[in-house]
Amino acid sequence: MAVELHQAWTRVMASPDLDAVVVVGAGAEALCLGLVRRDALAVPANALRPPSRGIPLVAAVNGVACA
């Protein structure tokens, strides 16, 4: 998942016409913001941070959300 998230942020940064980003989990499973350590090691350390373009980042949650 870390590689896919890194690729998504790269696409966001390369798309100047975006007004917002919505992150959605797939399927009916729980969405976990934690990472499997081996996945996180596959990308640069700062690659998983959301882009800082000044656009809204929204997490669409279908179910229970805990902060």
Image: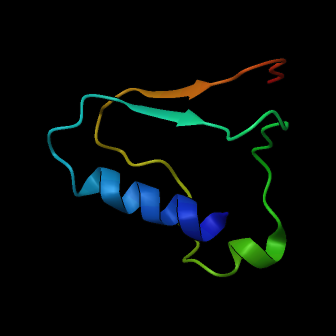
Closer-to-camera residue (29/20): 29
In the image, what residue occupies the spot 21% across and 50% down?
15
In the image, what residue occupies the spot 75% across and 45% down?
33
Residue 66, percent across and down?
84, 22
In the image, what residue occupies the spot 30% across and 33% down?
54
Q: In which quadrant will I find the C terminus?
A: top right
> Which of the 4 image quarters holds residue 43?
bottom right
**Residue sticking out furthest to the front:** 27
Q: In which quadrant will I find the N terminus?
A: bottom right
Q: Is residue 54 positioned above or below 60 on the image?
A: below
Q: Is residue 21 positioned above or below 43 on the image?
A: above
Closer-to-camera residue (53/23): 23
- Give the mark count: 0
> Which of the 4 image quarters holds residue 39?
bottom right
31 displayed left or right of 22: right
Residue 29, percent across and down?
84, 38
Closer-to-camera residue (56/7): 7
Residue 21, percent across and down?
40, 34
Can I make out residue 22 in this image?
Answer: yes
In the image, what residue occupies the spot 78% across and 38% down?
31
Can I make out residue 47 in this image?
Answer: no
